[in-house]
Image (cartoon, grey):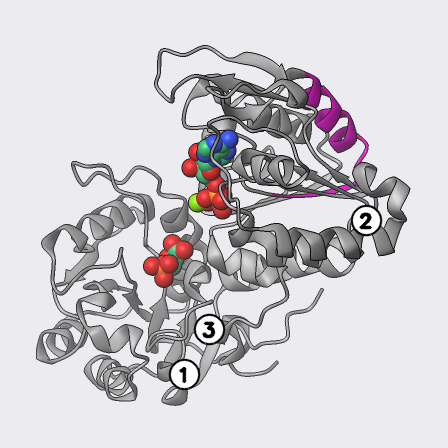
Amino acid sequence: MTFFKKTIRDLPLQGETVVVRVDYNVPLTDDGEISDDLRIKASLPTIKYLLARGCKVVLLSHLGRPDGKEKKYSLEPIAARLSTLLAKEVVFVDDTVGDTVYQAVRRAPKKSVLLLENLRYYPEEEADSHAFAKAIVKSTRAKYFVQDGFGAVHRAHASTHAITLFLPSVAGLLVEREYTTISHAMHTPKHPLVAVMGGAKVSDKIAVIEKFVPKADTILIGGAMANTFLAYRGLKVGSSKYEPDQAEVLDRLYAVVAEKVGQSHVDDFLVLPSDVAVASSIDTHHTRSNRSVQHIHDSDIALDIGNESIERYSAIIAHARTVVWNGTLGYAELPEFAHGSARVALTLATHPQTVSIIGGGDTADFALKWDGGEGASFTHVSTGGGASLDLMAGKTLPGVESLLDA
Ligand code: ADP
Ligand code: 3PG
Ligand code: MG
């Protein structure tokens, strides 16, 4: 599938200064350690491509949602990790615009990498300020802008939108790969296409679930979201997490499903767990007990799909040719309640001919930890949370739309 935007491959880059928006909004531990560097690793191909063409590479990113210049959201530790991964010096510049930036970029030789301080230290970033974007361009004297922060392209901010008004702007290799892989799976999938939807809330994911109804052959529901479906269907969910106010949304969803597959096949298409794994509280000392969904006790907290459901979901996934997975099937932070999610991962890993696309922050995190590497067990593990969901749901992504057309 060809990408509809220009990319770095379309530019005469030789020796130019290039500003690259990356998404280094990585999870940090309480001690400020980087707990997952997928997003940093994913930015390397574009940086290396630009360095190989003699460019001066000026990186821009946000980190977290700081309230002013909070030290704990500084990108300085990220510069150190990037330097290790690149095996090359990365100059950290402790401002995002102004003379400090100007001097640092001017002094840096060609083929060097600079990382500017957190964009969100300036409220102008999220306000999509033209003046702020212009100031970045002026301080760096860049010739081109490259968008490679896939995780942030669903935002219309100064570094994803306004800056494209002032520089010729193209996609980096990560944005191109994410966009084409995910949209290809959505538009021309190999069938059977199975969508595995879990996670915390129906309200977060309903737009994507609805989008999958016409395309998918089966939709498997898990996670706390499954509790919302079960409660809607009149079952008792005990003390489980669920959303009691989704009746209208689910009425609509079931109506669309019934129209597609006929009333009598609704439950084969939109599959709910027949059993769940429960505990009486969420702590590390509880073991899972299996309950049929008809017999959930008042004190039970459903934290995973049950053993029978795991077998059933796994069998359906084993027969798929494309699987799109978004949202863990249980409280996967605790190994005891990660069985459902782990079995999905295992089934995908043992069917390498199946196209598997994994999206969502927690789901990608789980899949990578399960994989123990960079996600080689799957076709594609997205670096985007909201961005991948929006793309799957067919929403336009401001950070991609604003780039030059191919
Ligand atoms: P993603 O970040 O991949 O989009 P979500 O944030 O929607 O996924 O869902 C993951 C979260 O849902 C995790 O924090 C997980 O603990 C929680 N979760 C999944 N199943 C349950 C459950 N049965 N009860 C409570 N929380 C759950
Ligand atoms: C993400 O982690 O989803 C992106 O980096 C965007 O961050 P945001 O939700 O704070 O805009
Ligand atoms: Mg999440």
Q: Which residues are magenta?
A: 308-325
Tell me the amino acid under the disc marked 1: Thr
Three-letter code, disc 2: Lys
> Residue 72: percent from the left, percent from the top?
14, 50
- In this view of the protein, which residue sits in the foreground, 14 or 50? 50
Q: Along the polypeptide, which appears first: circle 1 or circle 2?
A: 1
Task: Based on the picture, tell me whether residue 294 belongs to the magenta stretch.
Answer: no
In this view of the protein, can residue 368 be seen by the observer?
no
User: How far apart in space, not on screen, are marks 1 and 3 (Cα)?
Assistant: 9 Å
- Drawn side of residue 362 relative to residue 162, left or right: right
Query: Label 3 vs label 2: CA separation?
Result: 28 Å
How many numbered marks appear?
Answer: 3
| Disc 1 target residue | 164
Which residue is tagged 3?
A: 399
Which residue is more in the foreground, 120 or 351? 120
Badge 2 marks a residue whose secondary structure is loop
Residue at 63% from the left image edge and 56% from the top image edge: 248
Quarter placement of the N terminus: bottom right
Which residue sits at x=26%, y=51%?
88
For marks 1 and 3, the one nearer the N-term is 1
Whether residue 291 is visible: yes
What residue did someone put label 2 on? Answer: 190
Instruction: Look at the numbered disc 1 and say if its residue's Cβ is closer than 8 Å to ligand 2.
Output: no
Tell whether circle 2 marks a residue whose Cβ is less than 8 angstroms from ligand 1. no
Dividing the image into four quarters, tell me where ligand 3 lies.
Answer: top left
CB within 8 Å, label 3 to label 2: no
Question: Is disc 3 surrounded by few (<14), some (14 to 19) or many (20+) residues within 10 Å?
Answer: many
| Tag 1 secondary structure | helix
Q: Residues within 10 Å of mark 2 (few under 14, many from 20)?
A: some
What percent of the width, then of the height, locates residue 104?
A: 13, 71
- Compared to 316, does 228 lie above or below? below
